[in-house]
Amino acid sequence: MAADKEITITPFQTRVYALLAQIPEGRVSTYASLSKALGSSPRAVGGALRRNPFAPRVPCHRVIQADGYVGGFKGEWQKAPSGLNQVMKLEILAREGVRFDEKGVLVDRGRLWDRFDVKAEGSI
C-alpha cells in the first residue's frame, strides 16, 4: 500500500483557497475579483485553482471569467482538449442554481459575489 502523499501548498495558495471557501453555494466569483482581493493577478489565481487539492470543499468550480463566461475547470481551459471538465463545471453550478446560456455565459449577473473577508483569509 502506497504512503499517503503529503499536500504542500504555498502561502499564496493558502490565501486563495481561504477566500475561495467564502463563496457561497449558488453564487460565483471571478478570477479578477479574487485577484483584486489578494492584490495579485487573475493568472496567478488561475494557477492556484488549477492545483486546488481541497476540491470540492474549497469550491474552485465557483470561479468564472470577468465577462461572465464559465471558463475552465480542473486545469483545462474552455473546452480543450475533451470538453468534459467544462461540462462537469456547468453541471455542478446548475445543481447549485447558477445558470449559463448555450454559449456558456452567466445568465443572472446577480449571482456574482465579491464580498471577500481578507482578514479571514488565513484559514481554509
Image: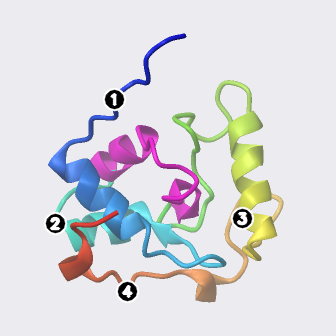
**How much space separates mark 3 and mark 2, taking CA atoms?**
27 Å
Which residue type carries mark 4? Arg
Q: Nearer the viewer, mark 2 or mark 4?
A: 4
Q: Would you name the residue on which mark 4 appears? A: 115
**How much space separates mark 1 and mark 4, taking CA atoms?**
32 Å
Q: Secondary structure at mark 2?
A: loop
Q: Please tell me how crowded label 4 is: few (under 14), some (14-19), or many (20+) other residues with Cα within 10 Å.
A: few
Image coordinates of residue 123 in percent, x first then y, are 28, 66
Q: Nearer the viewer, residue 10 or 62?
A: 10
Which residue type carries mark 1? Glu
Magenta span of residues: 43-64
Q: Residue at x 60, y 78 (%)?
A: 27
**How much space separates mark 3 and mark 4, taking CA atoms?**
19 Å
Residue 95's tag is none
Disc with the residue nearer the chain's start (2 vs 4): 2
Disc with the residue nearer the chain's start (2 vs 1): 1
